[in-house]
Image: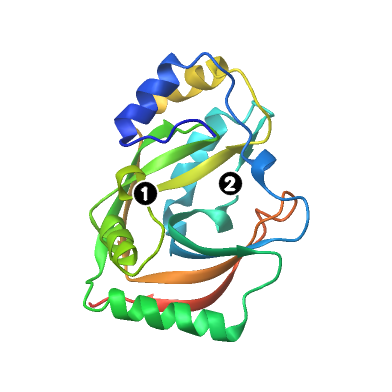
């Protein structure tokens, strides 16, 4: 994976000037059974058609796998990665800790706008202070999150092979300022996500939830 970006503007500028091939998202995933336990923010189904408009712009590029509607989300933190599903005791401990550190956090609004490109995926930026507040509180709880490169986003297309960025630039530059819409976030979901090369886009299992203050 290439260098991490501190801002979305930095990521976009790098993409515009990029000469080396884009990287495969799937190449770094294990071939055997694997699961990620992660805190995610769900995505409003009413906004999916606007995501699909952007996806159609790069739909002719076979090396991009569009994210299915059920897999659209904003990731806050990965808790663990293992070859077996986490047990109930581990899940309970994770939920209880999050309830402590997120106590008093109010519901918040996120705006999804501006198409961008990371090393291995097409994304839509998620604007609003809420996701960063959640991440910073997890940092205080001991989670290994680097806040200087925490850029909340929704991945809409993952690269399944290295590829020349030029045709993707042609597709995305006209859509850079796309506005997808706004969403009120009322909770965070603890999810068990199948994470092997062949299962990564399967539906995840919600195993815990922390609701925010109305």
Q: Quadrant of residue 83?
A: bottom right
- In this view, the residue in front, 61 or 47, is 61
- Please name which of the two marks, 2 or 1, marks the residue nearer to the observer: 1
Whether residue 135 is visible to the viewer of this picture, yes or no, is yes
Residue at 33% across / 60% down in the picture?
135
- In this view, the residue in front, 141 or 201, is 141
The residue that label 1 is drawn on is: 152
Q: CA distance from mark 2 to mark 1?
A: 16 Å
Residue at 59% across / 85% down in the picture?
88
Q: Residues within 10 Å of mark 2 (few under 14, many from 20)?
A: many
- The correct choice, above or below, for 10 with respect to 27 in the image is above
Say the numbered circle drawn on residue 40: none
Residue at 57% across / 28% down in the picture?
58
- The correct choice, above or below, for 201 with respect to 86 in the image is above
The residue that label 2 is drawn on is: 67
Tell me where residue 108 appears, x and y as whole percent: 24, 63
Query: Is 65 displayed left or right of 177 in the figure?
Result: right
- In this view, the residue in front, 59 or 65, is 65
Tell me where residue 50 appears, x and y as whole percent: 44, 43
SS under mark 2:
loop
Q: Residues within 10 Å of mark 1 (few under 14, many from 20)?
A: many
- The correct choice, above or below, for 69 with respect to 9 in the image is below
- Image marks 2 and 1: residues in contact by CB distance under 8 Å: no
- In this view, the residue in front, 179 or 118, is 118
Tell me where residue 98 appears, x and y as whole percent: 37, 75
Query: Is 77 displayed left or right of 60 in the figure?
Result: left
Disc tally is 2
SS under mark 1:
loop
């Amino acid at each position: 994976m290439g260098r991490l970006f501190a801002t979305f503007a930095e990521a976009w500028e790098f993409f515009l000037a990029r000469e080396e091939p884009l990287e495969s998202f799937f190449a770094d995933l294990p071939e055997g059974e694997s699961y990620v336990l992660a805190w995610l923010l769900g995505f409003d189904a009413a906004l999916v058609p606007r995501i699909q408009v952007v996806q159609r712009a790069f739909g002719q590029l076979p090396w991009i796998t569009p994210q299915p509607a059920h897999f659209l989300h904003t990731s806050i933190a990965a808790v663990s990665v293992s070859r077996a599903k986490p047990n109930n005791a581990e899940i309970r401990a994770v939920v209880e800790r999050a309830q402590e550190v997120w106590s008093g956090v109010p519901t918040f609004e996120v705006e999804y706008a501006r198409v961008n490109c990371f090393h291995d995926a097409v994304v839509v930026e998620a604007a609003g202070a809420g996701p960063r507040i959640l991440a910073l509180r997890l940092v205080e709880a001991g989670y290994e999150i680097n806040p200087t490169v925490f850029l909340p986003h929704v991945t809409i297309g993952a690269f399944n092979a290295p590829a020349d960025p030029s045709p993707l630039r042609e597709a995305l530059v006209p859509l850079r300022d796309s506005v997808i819409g706004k969403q009120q976030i009322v909770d965070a979901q603890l999810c068990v996500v199948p994470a092997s090369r062949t299962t990564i886009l399967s539906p995840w299992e919600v195993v815990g939830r922390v609701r925010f203050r109305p």
